[in-house]
Image (cartoon, helix red, strand yellow):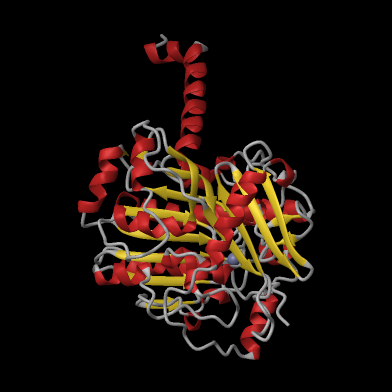
């Protein structure tokens, strides 16, 4: 005689229901597992953002992805699936849609990012320039507040001897294994002995040992996108420079995923403020050149900035108006309830974040943003500086380039012409005059601190930088 369970087995619907349930669980898990496991952070809102400043358990993870161009990421509207994990983080936190890097060359850009002042005021615009010891660095503020401070960097331009180690208890290049064979097979000319995986391995080791022993600030400066490194799994877009760059972005996304999965598993996501940023973008011939550290058009200066809290925002917040890399640390320090150094150009974007989180309009008028490159940065100081400055304001980008035959000016209506290809100088004489005045005033600024003696970089160090593709005589 058939029992009830056999009767059930002979019917078709329970199987169908079970199969649908399994598919459903799988789909749900895909949604929740983009960082490797269900994200256990609670949902938060504007009041939780404000309350961060009075918490005494919040750590800071700062991931600087060198050479990461904003509009090659899904969260910034890119059609290719290059960044599911970064998108996930952005969509549950704060995304700054129009973020401007202060230069297209790492050393100049990072000096401004850390100190919150524009390149004319950091005095770091050429390769011998050293960041002043008088500069008050975020790592110093955090260290004084009791954080354990660790920097793991993979770009030679931010070496300690350039002045970038101020405030770090530990500031090292992570040593690691050789790149995996999957990476070596796709990148037979790979010059570095390791990859961003080494930085993540060093970071997880640090977290394993010290992660629960007081507050910490961890800075990772990743380089694999700069080096166009990808592997067999991410070789899905093609063989042009742009394709390979996108493959490197996708691989980097997985590297970041590995770190976040570790942090999720060990319970670090619930008390860590995560900052993702970049020092500059990358050109693919939009205005003639390829690469970076050559011009200050949008493709080289529009970068991502993401903040992710110990809780998720649902929906995430987007700050739509123009912001700058010099705003990153004033914002992070205010979020943590820590003092911002005096007299800086960068402004805290906490009011903008809170307004956006509450669905209110942006609270303050937006000041112009500047990006700056000394075309002679790689030359000895006998060569007179030739400045290129880009000013972003009011939906326009003005570009002034000091060429041997005289100054060249361009004006783009970025809102109508996002690729900035149609020079509208002739149509807007008043705007042109205004931007010219802003640029002259900007270039007249003096370094804020006493200059350090010029660096003497030895031939071996120069060779390491040449190996990164920089054209240094
Ligand atoms: Zn860089």
Q: Quadrant of the C terminus?
A: bottom right
Measuring from the top left, give residue 1's x and y in whole percent: 41, 9
Nearest the camera: 174 or 171? Answer: 171
The quarter of the picture showing ligand 1: bottom right
Nearest the camera: 122 or 13? Answer: 122
Name the residue: 48% across, 17% down.
17
Name the residue: 76% across, 56% down.
241
Q: Please tell me whether residue 201 is drawn above or below residue 351 in the rendered image.
A: below
Q: Is residue 68 visible?
A: no
Instruction: Specify whether 181 is left or right of 27.
Output: right
Q: Is residue 31 visible?
A: yes
Measuring from the top left, give residue 206's x and y in whole percent: 37, 69
Q: Please tell me whether residue 182 is drawn above or below residue 355 in the rendered image.
A: below
Q: Please tell me whether residue 364 is drawn above or below residue 289 in the rendered image.
A: above
Name the residue: 42% across, 60% down.
345
Q: How many marks?
A: 0
Measuring from the top left, give residue 64's x and y in whole percent: 50, 61
Nearest the camera: 191 or 66? Answer: 66
Instruction: Specify whether 100 is left or right of 334.
Output: right
Measuring from the top left, give residue 388's x and y in whole percent: 65, 64
Nearest the camera: 337 or 19? Answer: 337
């Amino acid at each position: 005689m058939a029992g009830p369970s056999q009767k059930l087995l002979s019917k078709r619907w329970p199987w169908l229901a079970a199969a649908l349930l399994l598919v459903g669980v799988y789909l749900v898990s895909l949604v929740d597992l983009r960082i490797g496991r269900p994200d256990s952070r609670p949902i938060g809102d504007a009041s939780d953002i404000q309350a961060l400043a009075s918490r005494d358990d919040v750590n800071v993870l700062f991931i600087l992805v060198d050479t990461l161009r904003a509009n090659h990421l899904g969260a910034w509207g890119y059609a290719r699936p290059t960044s599911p994990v970064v998108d996930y983080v952005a969509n549950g936190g704060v995304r700054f849609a129009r973020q401007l890097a202060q230069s297209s060359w790492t050393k100049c850009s990072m000096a401004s990012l850390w100190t919150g002042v524009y390149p004319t005021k950091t005095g770091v615009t050429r390769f011998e320039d050293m960041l002043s010891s008088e500069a008050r660095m975020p790592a110093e503020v955090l260290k004084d507040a009791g954080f354990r401070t660790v920097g793991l960097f993979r770009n030679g331009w931010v070496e300690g001897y350039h002045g970038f180690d101020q405030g770090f208890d530990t500031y090292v290049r992570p040593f690691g294994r050789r790149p995996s064979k999957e990476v070596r097979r796709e990148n037979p000319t790979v010059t570095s002995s390791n990859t961003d995986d080494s930085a993540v391995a060093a970071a997880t080791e640090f977290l394993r040992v010290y992660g629960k022993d007081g507050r910490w600030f961890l800075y990772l400066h990743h380089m694999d996108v700069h080096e166009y490194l990808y592997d067999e799994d991410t070789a899905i877009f093609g063989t042009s420079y742009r394709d390979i760059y996108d493959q490197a972005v996708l691989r980097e996304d997985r590297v970041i995923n590995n770190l976040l999965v570790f942090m999720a598993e060990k319970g670090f996501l619930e008390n860590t403020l995560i900052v993702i940023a970049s020092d500059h973008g990358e050109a693919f011939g939009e205005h003639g050149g390829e690469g970076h550290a050559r011009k200050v058009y949008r493709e080289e200066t529009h970068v991502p900035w993401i903040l992710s809290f110990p809780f998720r925002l649902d929906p995430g917040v987007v700050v739509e108006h123009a912001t700058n890399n010099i705003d990153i640390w004033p914002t992070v320090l205010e979020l943590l309830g820590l003092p911002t150094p005096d007299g800086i150009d960068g402004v805290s974007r906490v009011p903008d974040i809170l307004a956006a989180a509450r669905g209110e309009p942006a609270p303050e008028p937006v000041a112009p943003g500047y990006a700056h490159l000394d075309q002679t940065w790689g030359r000895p100081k006998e060569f007179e500086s030739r400045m290129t400055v880009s000013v972003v304001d009011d939906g326009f980008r003005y570009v002034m380039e000091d060429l041997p035959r005289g100054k060249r000016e361009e004006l783009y209506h970025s809102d109508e012409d996002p690729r900035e290809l149609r020079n509208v100088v002739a149509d807007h004489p008043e705007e042109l005059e205004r931007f010219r005045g802003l640029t002259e005033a900007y270039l007249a600024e003096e370094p804020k601190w006493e200059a350090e003696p010029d660096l003497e970089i030895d031939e071996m160090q120069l060779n390491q930088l040449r190996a990164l593709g920089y054209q240094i005589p």
